Amino acid sequence: MKFSGYLFSLLCGLKLLFLVPARANDFSSFLSANASLAVVVDYEYMATHRQNIMAHFEKILSDIVRENMKNGGINVRYFTWNSIKIKKDFLAAITVADCENTWNFYKTTQRTSVLLIAITDSDCPRLPLNRALMIPMVDHGDEFPQIVLDAKVQGIFKWKAVVVLVDQSILESNPMLVKSIVHESTTNHIPPISVILYKINEKLRGQQKRAALREALAQFAPLKHELKRQNFLVISKFHEDIIEIAETLSMFHVNNQWMFFVLDELRRDFDANTVTINLDEGANIAFALNETVANCVDTLNCTITEVSMALVTSLSRMILEEQSIYGKISDEEWESIRFTKQEKQDEMLEYMKDYLKLNSKCASCARWRFETAITWGKSQENRKYRQAPTRTSKNRNFEFLNIGYWSPLLGFNCRELTFPHIEHHFRNITMDIVTVHNPPWQILTKDSRGVIVEHKGIVMEILKELSRALNFSYYLHEANSHEYQPSLIQGTNDSDELMGSMTYRIPYRVVELVQHNDYFMAAVAATIDEPHKKRFNYTQPISVQKYTFILRQPDEVSRIYLFMAPFTLETWGCLAGITLLTAPMLYAVNRLVPLQELQIKGLSTVKNCFWYIYGALLQQGGMYLPRADSGRLVVGFWWIVVIVLVTTYCGNLVAFLTFPKFQPGIDYLSQLFNHKEIKQYGLRNGTFFEKYVETTTRQEFKRFVESAAIYNTAQGENVEAVKHGDRINIDWRINLQLIVQQHFEVDKECRFALGKEDFVDEQIGLIVPSSSAYLHLINQHIDRLFRMGFIERWHKINLPSMDKCNVKNVQRQITNHKVNMDDMQGCFMVLLFGIIAALLITCFEFWYHRLVVVKRQRKNITFAN
Ligand SMILES: *[C@@H]1O[C@H](CO)[C@@H](O)[C@H](O)[C@H]1NC(C)=O
Ligand SMILES: *[C@@H]1O[C@H](CO)[C@@H](O)[C@H](O)[C@H]1NC(C)=O
Ligand SMILES: *[C@@H]1O[C@H](CO)[C@@H](O)[C@H](O)[C@H]1NC(C)=O
Ligand SMILES: *[C@@H]1O[C@H](CO)[C@@H](O)[C@H](O)[C@H]1NC(C)=O
Ligand SMILES: *[C@@H]1O[C@H](CO)[C@@H](O)[C@H](O)[C@H]1NC(C)=O
Ligand SMILES: *[C@@H]1O[C@H](CO)[C@@H](O)[C@H](O)[C@H]1NC(C)=O
Ligand SMILES: *[C@@H]1O[C@H](CO)[C@@H](O)[C@H](O)[C@H]1NC(C)=O
Ligand SMILES: *[C@@H]1O[C@H](CO)[C@@H](O)[C@H](O)[C@H]1NC(C)=O
């Protein structure tokens, strides 16, 4: 069964595919054939309502057609069986049936594409708005389930979870309410929703009721720094109490959405502005007000009349339009431009809606107006237009906007989003933002008149991205930054200004402006320091900067003893030792061979053996080889030792040639005090480091700061002394890097070294006024920028690069290293030493000969005589 059904639908689908081009326009024009309409009144529905609706319908419709159909005609066919298959030459069908049958009928008519006008029960999910018109017969006072259903179908509340607070009596009189709140559907694309339902016991009075409400709401109160997204739907007489209690629990924040249905008794004197008088900016709150006309009759007869009237007038309007065009153009042109069935139906639906919106009396007795609060950034706008503070009973930060209405006839009819701030955030209003020039965080470029024409830098990039994400534009106000840069007031010249930046001292003017709550935020990089004592709030950190020190790069180790370097002193000693030891051994082995002819003449003295072993070491080779196996073993093993020694020496010599060795420098601050040659300590003025040291336990920091010269100017910084190795300075690593970079560009040589150690993490954030409702929102977006890697990228672009004079660069120098005099001097020294030694020995031999040998000869002669 299932399979054949599938096959059938597949075949149908195929057929539809093939038919599409041919169907382009096979629907006859109203001029050549009457439009046909099907009226379907469900038999069971008639039975339950105990009226002959069909008969009434026939009478009403024929009367209306007779009176209003002046042009052309209409063929109407009546059915009482709702599972009828309507043929595709019907333009439209009007049905009167219950919800389930209406939906079934809709599904069957979709195949033959018939426009459906359905009159049905209340609490029915609306048919797709562009393909059908559905009029639920909603009784007075029972409209909530239908409103909720329509809101879901029309996407008025895009909620995944909702907390519903509803009066007990309303829940009892609307049994369908909960069902419609949890309604989900695939045809209408309504995702499932999770609901927390809280029934308000109306019997409780006064304090008791408030306590109960507080207890219910407290579960949803925001935790300290976590503002979750929550949605609240309140259908209650006690909305004022709820607003008041929720306010004290600070539940009106930028992420929450509150929808209040204001019940009938209060409607007449309801003013959204008075109810929200105590709320802070940034809330998302909307009200639904009952605008139902009290004494309006809402019967089935009346609805049928209105619908028929709408249909007939729309049809005759369309026929009139066709006639007026047809007269003016040729048949071929007419064929190509006339409407297809679909287009006709769309147009008819529009005409009918227009007619009903204007003329409907009974079908839209029930009517709810929706108002939403426009609050985000309101205090900014108010500040601009504020002349004198006026005392009114209005909350100036709330402005209520009528976004549209709901009626059973057309469902929601809205011009605006219910909670516009959730999607559009600040709705493109202009914010005032205070800033100061402080590269590389804030770089402001001004024209000759002092107007900021360009702004960039890390903080400004973040601001630009925030304004895009939160949909606001901004106007930058520069706070006077004179006290920030003391060099400017003293009138000294540019060459004396320190390089790099600092964020610990926030200009006083910025703090003042932010405290007055006049500005949305201060786009100023500021060190986060004791956030709870400040009268403003920091955002989450956008950067972390660390301190280190700068000093002269340690010198290279002298290369005069380079040829000695491959072996340590002990190795050299051992080498001499084994040479001296092996020679006698060889002598002994050679001497003790059992057969005389195996003895070698050349090795017959210890001296000769020594020269032999020494010569082998220098690879001069030996003229003789022992003939006895014992001797060969000694010599053989000695050669192995020689090979290992020589290879190790040569290899190591190459390494020592290529990798320069440095004298031990200062990598960590604690090593500083062992170096007596560094006499001056320097520390930039106004750093967080200075403050940090007051509370730290690290002794070397304290000692450093005690003896440090605090400098304000480039002169005080005394980079030359650092270069000479007399001084050490502490500053941000990025500032020091800037100095290294600058000197590298001038000298083409690395003269400075930075400490290996980074100390004191200085966190840097932006500033918002202390009462700002948007701190959390800004933090959320900064967090997002971090995770997307934008902030890291802006750091890379704006901060000095760290690859000047670091290990990588040194290595590049090594590959190009040429052996120079520095490297070879030791070698030449050895040669020189050898020559001198040879000369000395020659002299000594000469003297010996003269003094000893000749004297002795002379003595012998005298003896002989
Ligand atoms: C509806 O209209 C028909 C015909 O106009 C009339 O006979 C019938 O009594 C009306 N029904 C009601 C409930 O008013
Ligand atoms: C079209 O409608 C008119 C008036 O309703 C009627 O007189 C005429 O017979 C109809 N034509 C056809 C082809 O049904
Ligand atoms: C809306 O107002 C009408 C007329 O005042 C009233 O009949 C109806 O019960 C009200 N609706 C609700 C849900 O209170
Ligand atoms: C920004 O706000 C305006 C005004 O409400 C709105 O038209 C626009 O779509 C919003 N833009 C974004 C990206 O949300
Ligand atoms: C936002 O406002 C700015 C200036 O007020 C305007 O130039 C821009 O077109 C607006 N953007 C939108 C989407 O409304
Ligand atoms: C800048 O100041 C230094 C010392 O303070 C001085 O020697 C130099 O001449 C000044 N240069 C200019 C352009 O004023
Ligand atoms: C904002 O600053 C106030 C003090 O001005 C402090 O009490 C509050 O905790 C701060 N808020 C946040 C989220 O840090
Ligand atoms: C002295 O001369 C004689 C021969 O003239 C020689 O035999 C002897 O060894 C010499 N003595 C010394 C101490 O040289």
Image (spheres, rainbow, N blue to C red):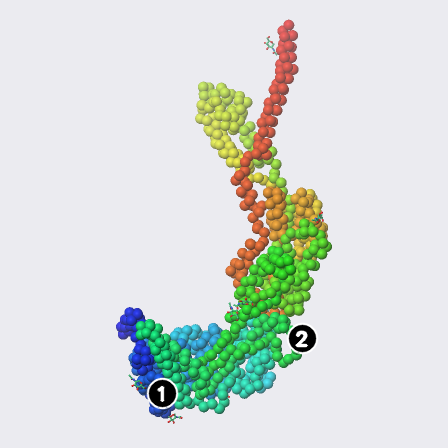
Callout 2 amino acid: Ala
Dot 2, crowdedness within 10 Å: few (<14), some or many (≥20)? few
In the rendered image, residue 399, in percent from the top left (x then y), is placed at: 57, 77
Whether residue 335 is visible: no
Q: Could you give the CA–CA distance between mark 1 and mark 2, rounded to whole angstroms? A: 64 Å
In the rendered image, residue 623, in percent from the top left (x then y), is placed at: 48, 22
Residue at left offset 59%, top offset 32%: 825
Residue at left offset 43%, top offset 83%: 356
Q: Tag 2's secondary structure?
A: loop
Q: Residue furthest top?
A: 865
Residue at left offset 70%, top offset 49%: 716
Image quarter of the N terminus:
bottom left
In the rendered image, residue 194, in percent from the top left (x then y), is placed at: 47, 75
- Counting labels gives 2
Which numbered dot is residue 65? 1
Callout 1 amino acid: Val
Image quarter of the C terminus:
top right
419 vs 477, left or right, is left
Q: Which of the 4 image quarters holds residue 480?
A: bottom right
User: With respect to residue 202, does 856 lie above or below?
Assistant: above
Dot 1, crowdedness within 10 Å: few (<14), some or many (≥20)? some
User: With respect to residue 595, does 759 lie above or below?
Assistant: below
Q: Is mark 1 within 8 Å of ligand 2?
A: yes
In the rendered image, residue 475, in percent from the top left (x then y), is placed at: 60, 65
Which numbered dot is residue 388? 2
Split into quadrants, the picture shows ligand 1 in the one at: bottom left
Whether residue 423 is visible: yes
Earlier in the chain: of badge 1 and badge 2, it is 1
Q: Is mark 2 within 8 Å of ligand 5?
A: no
Which numbered dot is residue 584? none
